[in-house]
Image (spheres, rainbow, N blue to C red):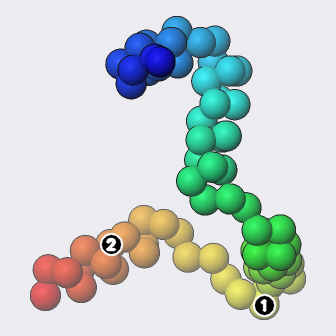
């Protein structure tokens, strides 16, 4: 049986492509994807992109958002 330190050492020595696959599989094993939920998120993302493109909504620069948050937290 391999211990955690040995396993981590082996994982760290892998090429980047295999590390990426290992990470994806480990994350998936912790929180398996639900196809129905993934599809709903994809639809929501597409809807939001279309709203931005059509001008229905206006994007707010990230700097502005974080400035407002900092201001509210400092009150």
Q: Residue at x 63, y 49 (%)?
A: 29
Q: Residue at x 67, y 40 (%)?
A: 25
Residue 52 in the image: x percent, y percent? Answer: 77, 78
Q: Which mark is residue 6?
A: none
Residue 54 in the image: x percent, y percent? Answer: 86, 82
Q: Residue at x 51, y 12 (%)?
A: 10
SS state under label 1: loop
Residue found farthest to the front: 1
Q: Quadrant of residue 32?
A: bottom right
Q: CA distance from mark 1 to mark 2?
A: 24 Å
Residue 60 in the image: x percent, y percent? Answer: 55, 76
Q: Which mark is residue 67?
A: 2
Residue found farthest to the left: 75
Q: Residues within 10 Å of mark 2 (few under 14, many from 20)?
A: few
Q: Quadrant of residue 50?
A: bottom right
Q: Nearer the viewer, residue 16 or 25?
A: 25
SS state under label 2: helix
Q: Where 49 sits versus 32, above or below?
A: below
Q: Which mark is residue 56?
A: 1
Q: Quadrant of residue 69?
A: bottom left
Is residue 28 visible to the viewer in this orientation of the structure? Answer: yes
Q: Nearer the viewer, residue 33 or 50?
A: 33
Q: Where 38 sits versus 13, above or below?
A: below
Which quarter of the figure is the C terminus placed in?
bottom left
Q: Name the N-terminal-most of marks 1 and 2.
A: 1
Total numbered labels placed on residues in the image? 2
Q: Is residue 17 left or right of residue 60?
A: right
Q: Is residue 65 left or right of residue 47?
A: left
Q: Nearer the viewer, residue 45 or 1?
A: 1
Is residue 52 visible to the viewer in this orientation of the structure? Answer: no
């Amino acid at each position: 049986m391999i211990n955690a330190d040995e396993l981590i050492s082996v994982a760290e020595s892998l090429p980047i492509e295999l590390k990426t696959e290992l990470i994806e599989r480990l994350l998936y094993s912790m929180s398996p994807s639900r196809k129905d939920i993934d599809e709903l998120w994809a639809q929501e993302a597409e809807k939001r992109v279309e709203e931005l493109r059509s001008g229905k909504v206006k994007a707010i620069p990230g700097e502005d958002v974080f400035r407002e948050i900092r201001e509210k937290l400092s009150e």
